Amino acid sequence: MKQSARELKENIEKIIINKERVIRISKQIITGDEKKALEFYEQALKIGEEGVMFKKLDAPYKQGRRVGFMVKLKPIVNDFDLVIVGAEYGTGKRAGWLTSYIVACKKENKFLEVGKVSSGLKEKEEEGTTYMEITKLLKPLIIEESGNLARVKPKLIISVTYQNIQKSSAYSSGFALRFPRITAFRPDRGVESIASLIDIEKEMKKGER
């Protein structure tokens, strides 16, 4: 805890061996060039990261939101962490992949649908989380299939941005996210951490003001 950011990074590099899709050391640049910093930030967003952290190299780690020597930079957007409860198979070049996802919030021990999202994932692995990757993870979770639709166990969490929320009888929550887009796959999150129906209702009321 008392080591500087530079020392922590050096020690982590000594003990962590990068292993694809298991663990890797976070990418870092040391620069005073604003253009290079912006490019690094934009690349992080492109591959699905939430944002970047700026840290003073000779300062120790300290818990808290405003400690004076590190700060988070991320876009200001409306977003929820939601769980996938259903998915539809794609067509054309996406045939065989599950590419449109029904997402849900929680109410006590129930999952209530709040919309369908199909944009935001990638087709090439080097660009970020792909439709193929999510398909491979979803297929073992399939409970039943009917035509083009598959119902799945609520296990996979994704972050979804949206423009606003509207009332809708099409989904079991009574609400629907408008213009949703996937920004990240969250394997680090469990269903206990997803947005609740109360969260959805609160955000809708904010939008009505």
Image (tube, rainbow, N blue to C red):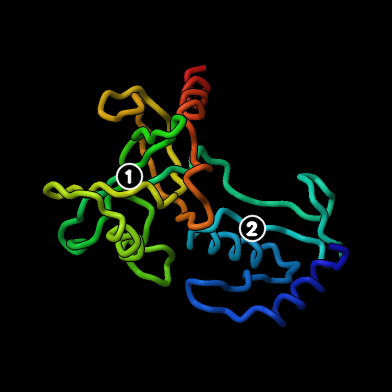
Dot 1 or dot 2, earlier in sequence = 2
Q: Amino acid under label 2? A: Val
Q: Quadrant of residue 94?
A: bottom left
Mark 1 or mark 2, whichever is nearer to me: 1
Q: Which mark is residue 52?
A: 2
Q: Quadrant of residue 17?
A: bottom right
Q: Amino acid under label 1? A: Val
As helix, strand or loop, the secondary structure at mark 1 comes to strand
Nearer to the camera, 54 or 62 = 62
Residue drawn at the location 55% of the way across and 62% of the way down:
44
Residue drawn at the location 77% of the way across and 55% of the way down:
70
Nearer to the camera, 167 or 77 = 167
As helix, strand or loop, the secondary structure at mark 2 comes to strand
Percent x, y for residue 97? 24, 61
* Residue that carries the numbered disc 1 in the rendered image: 85
CB of mark 1 within 8 Å of CB of mark 2? no
